[in-house]
């Protein structure tokens, strides 16, 4: 019993010592991550940027002359980059400097290099590398860095044009309700702050405005919006009447959606053309 107890205590002591923090080496420049940002979001890809603050701990200036980093996405190497700066960045004595380390994600290339990620809703990005500085005597020192972030596998927003409801349709004008469904095909929720739109029938602009204020779209969900239309065919032309009277009518819904997703706020172009029915 005593032997068993002694072994247990020894095991706990070993676990405690193994978990004890290891002293980190001191460098002339302290690196701290200030922001992870997704930008230029499209169904074709995005840019993931790491904004890192450099703090010079010395009483003499340093110069950032080059950097290198390797990017791994979901355990597969995506990028290996080494860049020498044409003009070194001066980091003043005891000074601070904010730099950006961008990673351009092209989905086509990502899906080739990282099997299985195409079916996911997001992916993890690991960036490891270093920043190389020189002092006034050209002595170089490399400061290692390791960063992590996730980013979306973004599949855009879909617009479906639904049948137009005609409350009244004469050769002089029409009282209509145009309907469109905004669909979120992504595996994460989307907040739609607003949609600025233009609506054309038979190639003629018949309405423009703003809809969908503060609408929430769950993952893989859609919501329908209605736009009342009072048309004067003496203004729009007979071609619009003919299109509505002999459906399906050619329609185009275009504009811009201002959305929010877990990775930030974005402006997304919308454009859908179709021939749609007219119901009475």
Image (cartoon, rainbow, N blue to C red):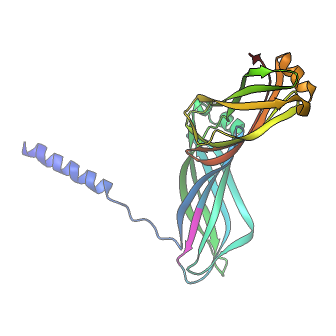
Exactly how many numbered labels are in the figure? 0
**Residue toward you, 270 or 61:** 270
Residue, far bottom: 59
Report the magenta residues as a range: 52-57
**Residue toward you, 48 or 191:** 191
Magenta segment main secondary structure: strand
Indicate the position of residue 224 as horizontal and vertical percent values.
64, 28
Quarter of the view holding residue 74: top right
Quarter of the view holding residue 189: top right
Write the residue at 57% across / 40% down.
Answer: 123
Please determine whether, in this image, residue 264 is positioned above or below residue 245: below
The magenta stretch spans residue 37: no
- Residue 153 seen by the camera: yes
- Residue 105 seen by the camera: no
Residue, far left: 1
Indicate the position of residue 28 as horizontal and vertical percent values.
53, 74
Write the residue at 62% across / 37% down.
Answer: 153
Indicate the position of residue 124 as horizontal and vertical percent values.
55, 43
Write the residue at 72% across / 63% down.
Answer: 84
Quadrant location, the N terminus: top left
Indicate the position of residue 238 as horizontal and vertical percent values.
92, 25
Please determine whether, in this image, residue 15 is positioned above or below residue 28: above
Quadrant location, the C terminus: top right
**Residue toward you, 4 or 15:** 15
Name the side, left or right, on which 84 lies relative to 51. right
Quarter of the view holding residue 262: top right
Please determine whether, in this image, residue 28 is positioned above or below residue 15: below
């Amino acid at each position: 019993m005593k032997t068993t107890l002694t072994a247990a205590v020894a095991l706990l002591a070993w676990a405690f010592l193994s978990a004890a923090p290891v002293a980190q080496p001191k460098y002339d420049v302290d690196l701290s991550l200030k922001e992870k940002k997704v930008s230029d979001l499209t169904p074709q890809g995005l840019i993931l940027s790491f904004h890192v603050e450099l703090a010079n701990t010395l009483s003499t200036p340093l110069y950032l002359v080059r950097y290198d980093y390797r990017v791994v996405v979901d355990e597969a190497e995506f990028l290996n980059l080494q860049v020498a700066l044409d003009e070194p960045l001066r980091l003043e004595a005891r000074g601070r400097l904010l730099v950006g380390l961008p990673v351009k994600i092209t989905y086509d290339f990502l899906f080739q290099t990282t099997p299985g990620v195409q079916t996911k809703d997001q992916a993890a990005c690991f960036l490891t590398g270093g920043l190389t500085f020189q002092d006034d005597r050209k002595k170089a020192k490399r400061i290692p860095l390791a960063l992590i972030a996730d980013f979306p596998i973004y599949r855009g927003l879909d617009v479906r044009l639904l049948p137009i409801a005609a409350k009244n349709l004469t050769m002089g004008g029409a009282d209509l309700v145009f309907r469109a469904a905004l669909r979120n095909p992504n595996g994460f929720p989307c907040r739609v702050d607003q949609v600025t739109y233009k609506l054309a029938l038979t190639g003629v602009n018949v309405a423009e405005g703003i809809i969908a204020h503060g609408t929430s779209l769950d993952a893989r969900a859609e919501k329908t919006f209605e736009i009342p239309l009072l048309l004067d065919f003496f203004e729009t032309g007979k071609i619009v009447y003919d299109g509505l009277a002999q459906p399906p009518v050619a329609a185009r819904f275009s504009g811009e959606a201002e959305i929010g997703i877990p990775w930030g706020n974005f402006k997304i172009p919308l454009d859908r053309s179709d021939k749609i029915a007219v119901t009475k």
